[in-house]
Image (spheres, coloured by chain):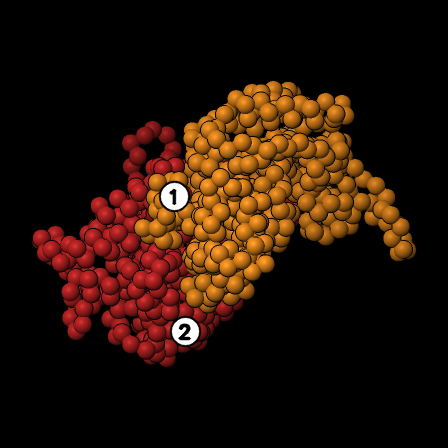
Chain colours: A orange, B red
């Protein structure tokens, strides 16, 4: 915490990461633009770009016709087809594997529905690894995989990536990352993160929350998860479980929650409650389509569906108001099935916030739906997988190449 | 956010701040110890110490007898008597001004009770400035004031230090810092912070939370405030109002709160509710002594007081459980009147946390009372006032000396 400043070599490595992050997040960028954005001189940018080019992470090209006179500044592009990560997303009803290129391009993907029921670690990791192996067979020989990560609907222990608590998946104390890495067998560990945390990271870096350093992402996938960006950083908490806002009690003595408590936000706003309140529980459709049906029915004037959304919107609004008081965020983003629930109950949510959030804390607050939609959590997993190469590009490549 | 690494000169200035912070927080420290803690070589420490000595911020001395053979390493001490800040604390029932020396030594202080009633900006700032001027008259001529800051029981807008919202002081949209600086008239601005936020900072840097990077400080002073340290940094939120946990709704439809909402943590656990529940409202004693009376009565077997604390402990426990799920903190600290309330209701609080907080999120959680007691918020104000000189010692001194 109170270490001295970095050495020249540490600064160079840091700068390589900063430059790579610029083109990873911003896409092809001219040297002139990088010089100005990074606040270093032109020769430093040239040296950094040369290092990254030699490592095969970026390439330089003449820009397309600019229409301006004079010699154009070379454009630095991420080597999206050559440098990639494997990203996985385990939701309650769907599993996804993707090959994502530097720059955030989804190069290839496989997905499959997931049966609700007990958590089967062997079958799940075999399926995901199978998807990955299929995609790897179609990958050019000179392409290099620089990381792997998975988003999962559960609380993940930061120290070892164990899924400590995922009631909606039936997962408790599951060494998911370790087992997936073993089955992948490509010499890389698999980082694991809570789906809502990674959704927050994704919306912050590539979605509706770009440029917004204090935001809350609420993710609905049967239950309710949360991810919080505080001062530009993902809130992880002491052991990695930070952001479990779905288990904030909003209605003491209310509905029984899967966690054993009563009246949690998840119990009052989760899928089961919405479907029950709308008279659609038991035997019928479940999942996002079922939630969308309720919202569409309310739009068409179905009074039962309207009342269900009002009730749920009240609790969602109280939950959001609490978070607004606690975090004073600039933006709250609704993702997963909460996207639909919010769209169907926005008036209720706003009204509760107006009553229960302090005026200062809600001043300038923006309520938004996820820009990345169903890919938010997968995109966050890809960003987590890229974290190593962005932090220290040459060191990360050296590690990968030594496998 | 994505700037390049620092220059050599920036690193030197940064390192001067790091070294000064070490002796400010850790007290007299040997050169050898600083070398090891900062991870730089001995000649760098010598150069940094020489600069800080020349600036009058530290001095070097031979240590007392060590009993070890060989030449002892010189000890670097903060110039506590020579370099100081002015710190102020405005609570509901008490105002304090203090002169605090580098190293956190309270060199001098003045306090006075405050009448409950409307907020009188003129009278309050005149009183505080008067205290400061008295103390300055007794200060050595060569001493230098490097900052001034105040803690206040209200929400403070980060941009300009205006107290946006302080219902328990009757303060709304008050330019408190600006007015206090005008009356002080010593050529320095007065930084202003929410009392609970500064209490969190104080407990994190000098109190029970030292070494703990994820903690929540709950401050009771008629109402309930909160300050949250996330990853070692104070959570400020988008506009500075972060941490208003007292207005988290824990009991929808519950007691009316001063903020206009119902069932806020502050409404269910605040002073008025405790005294009412204990049958001691209306005309009797108020303030911390009154709260202590309730806790002592409960200890002596007063059933009404015991039931009051049980009821309040239930709501406090639900509030803390919510915060544990949201933040996954390592420690929750109870300060101000909440210190007494927690001590009188700890079993209730723990029981609610056990029920309503996820097992992962509460694993390893420590519940503690404030180590700095009634000086927590004042100490935080002093740390806020020292922030400039610790960030860039020479630049801050140059600014002060040019006044």
The answer to whether A78 is drawn above or below residue A34 in the figure is: above
Do residues under tags 2 and 1 come within 8 Å of each other at their CB atoms?
A: no
Q: Where is residue B158 in the image (x, y as percent from the top left)?
A: 48, 63
Q: Distance between the residues labelled 2 and 1?
A: 40 Å
- Residue at 39% x, 62% y is B194
Q: Can residue A80 be seen in this view?
A: yes
Q: In this view, does A211 lie to the left or right of B58?
A: right
- Residue at 40% x, 76% y is B183
Q: Where is residue A115 in the image (x, y as percent from the top left)?
A: 54, 31
Please give the residue where the numbered disc 1 appears in the rendered image.
A257
- Residue at 63% x, 47% y is A372
- Residue at 54% x, 58% y is A302
- Mark 2 packing: few (<14 Cα in 10 Å), some, or many (20+)? some
Report the front residue among A333 and A317.
Answer: A317
Are labels 2 and 1 on one chain? no
Q: Report helix, strand or loop for mark 1.
A: loop
Please give the residue where the numbered disc 2 appears in the rendered image.
B172
Q: In this view, does A10 lie to the left or right of B311?
A: right
Q: Where is residue A57 in the image (x, y as percent from the top left)?
A: 73, 34
């Amino acid at each position: 915490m109170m270490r001295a400043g970095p050495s020249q070599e540490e600064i160079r490595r840091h700068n390589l990461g900063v430059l790579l992050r610029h083109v990873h997040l911003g896409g092809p960028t001219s040297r002139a633009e990088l010089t100005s954005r990074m606040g270093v001189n032109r020769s430093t940018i040239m040296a950094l770009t040369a290092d990254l080019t030699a490592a095969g992470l970026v390439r330089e090209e003449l820009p397309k016709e600019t229409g301006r006179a004079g010699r154009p500044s070379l454009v630095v592009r991420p080597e999206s087809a050559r440098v990639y990560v494997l990203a996985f997303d385990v939701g309650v009803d769907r599993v996804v594997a993707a090959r994502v290129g530097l720059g955030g391009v989804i190069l290839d993907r496989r997905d499959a529905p997931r049966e609700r029921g007990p958590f089967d670690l062997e079958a799940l990791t075999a399926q995901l690894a199978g998807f990955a192996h299929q995609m790897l067979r179609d990958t050019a020989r000179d392409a290099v995989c620089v990381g792997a990560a998975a988003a999962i609907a559960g609380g993940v222990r930061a120290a070892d990536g164990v899924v400590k608590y995922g009631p909606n998946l039936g997962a408790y104390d599951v060494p998911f990352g370790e087992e997936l890495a073993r089955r992948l067998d490509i010499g890389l560990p698999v980082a694991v993160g809570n789906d809502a945390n990674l959704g927050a990271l994704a919306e912050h870096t590539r979605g509706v929350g770009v440029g917004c350093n204090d935001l809350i992402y609420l993710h609905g996938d049967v239950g309710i998860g949360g991810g919080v960006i505080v001062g530009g950083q993902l809130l992880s908490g002491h052991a990695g479980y930070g952001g479990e806002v779905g288990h904030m009690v909003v209605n003491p003595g209310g509905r029984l929650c899967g966690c054993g408590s009563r009246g949690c936000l998840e119990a009052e706003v989760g899928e089961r409650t919405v479907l029950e309140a709308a008279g659609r529980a038991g035997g019928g459709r479940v999942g996002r389509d079922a939630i969308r049906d309720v919202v569409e029915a309310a739009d068409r004037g179905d009074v039962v569906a309207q009342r269900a959304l009002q009730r749920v919107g009240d609790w969602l609004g109280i939950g959001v108001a609490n978070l607004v008081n606690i975090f004073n965020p600039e933006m709250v983003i609704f993702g997963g099935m909460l996207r639909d629930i919010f769209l169907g109950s926005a008036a209720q949510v706003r009204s509760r916030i107006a009553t229960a959030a302090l005026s200062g804390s809600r001043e300038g607050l923006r309520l938004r739906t996820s820009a990345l939609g169903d890919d938010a959590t997968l995109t966050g997993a890809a960003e987590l997988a890229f974290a190593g190469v962005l932090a220290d590009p040459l060191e990360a490549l050296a590690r990968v190449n030594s496998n």
